[in-house]
Image (tube, rainbow, N blue to C red):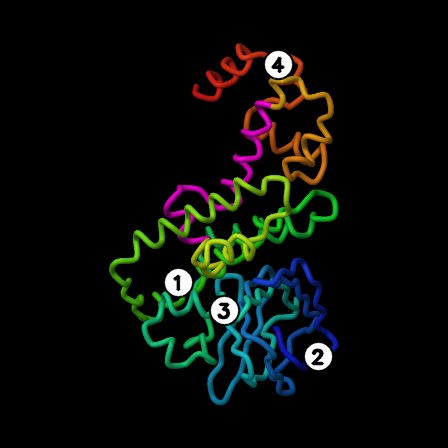
Amino acid sequence: MPCATAPAKVTYRKLYASPVVRVSDYTCLAGREGPQAEELCGANNVVLMRRGAFSKHFGRRTVTADVNQAAFFSKGSAYRVAHPAECGDRGTVFELSPRVLSDIVRELDSSAEGRPDRPFPFDAGPCETAVFWRHRDLVLTLEAADAAPLEPLWADVTAIQLVADVLEDAFERHGVTRKPRRRGTDEDHAERVEAAKAHLASRLSERITLEGVAEAAQISPFHLARLFRRHTGVPVHRYLTRLRLRASLERLAEGTPDLTELALDLGFSSHGHFTDTFRREFGRTPSEVRRHASRKALREMGKNLEV
């Protein structure tokens, strides 16, 4: 329940933050109770539940949020919260940057440009099974970020796409028609994607962010994420990982002596991060490939991947 004046029994914990999205875990320990004091929402937020339920009261209307529903909170809106059960509730708060949120909503709603300060024309929407599991997977990965390296580009794209899909389902459920696509943009979109690809290829050793790639392509982060996958078939973070891994094969074939140095040169956070990612992609470790470093060994590995 994201608000500017949160009750003491609600605790928040930041899971991830970047210039384009902030993801927070919240836990409410309230038991069964009626509507409480009025709260004021400090930002436009999307909330996905992981446990329990709460009811949001505003005027004579009531909306109940639970694990089957996404809840939408508009900046400046006033409401009161009640809890229909004793177990309290827990969920994830997604706060997109104003620009990213505006881009998503304007693509879905033909009337959104007339109400820039009110992006959500509804208070709840469906949380489909696939979205629920993707949400859980995102949270688990973010919570494990201290133990395992976290790729900011992946986090940005995954969180933005999750919110975009939730909003698309909500607009469809509430009968809001998609904004007609402008003609004559395919060529421009392709040029933006090519600019993004060139940016990635020239900065394999750098820390890449969605905002940075979008700036290089002169397009918004949300539209870059959508268009990149549409034109290449893979998300931008996956494309970057493949660039790095495939670049490593030549270095391994040459018998590079220091795998840690190779990992850092290609933008991986550590030797372990590089090895784990390499194994998932190719089915063997960099050390194994280097140990049998030859053109024949690489050809054999390629044949195995084709099977």
Q: In the visual, does 218 lie left or right of 285?
A: left
Q: Is residue 229 magenta?
A: yes
The quarter of the image holding the C terminus is top left
Q: Which residue is mark 3?
A: 99
User: Camera-side residue: 147 or 195?
Assistant: 195
For label 2, the crowd category at 10 Å Cα-Cα, with few meaning under 14, some 14 to 19 and many 20 or more, is some
Mark in the foreground, 1 or 4: 4
Label 3 element class: helix
| Magenta span dominant secondary structure | helix
Circles 2 and 1 in contact, beta carbons < 8 Å: no
Identity, as a three-letter code, of the amino acid under mark 1: Glu
Residue depicted at x 54% and y 29%: 246
User: Camera-side residue: 161 or 239?
Assistant: 239
Question: Quick one: label 2 or label 3, which is nearer the N terminus?
Answer: 2
Residue depicted at x 56% and y 55%: 212
Q: In the visual, does 128 lie left or right of 78?
A: left
Q: Which residue is mark 2?
A: 7
Mark in the foreground, 4 or 2: 4
Circles 3 and 4 in contact, beta carbons < 8 Å: no
Question: Quick one: label 1 or label 3, which is nearer the N terminus?
Answer: 3
Boundaries of the magenta span? 225-250
Mark in the foreground, 2 or 3: 3
Question: Quick one: label 3 or label 4, which is nearer the N terminus?
Answer: 3
Q: Which residue is mark 4?
A: 293
Identity, as a three-letter code, of the amino acid under mark 4: Ala
Q: Which residue is mark 1?
A: 168
Label 2 element class: loop
The quarter of the image holding the N terminus is bottom right
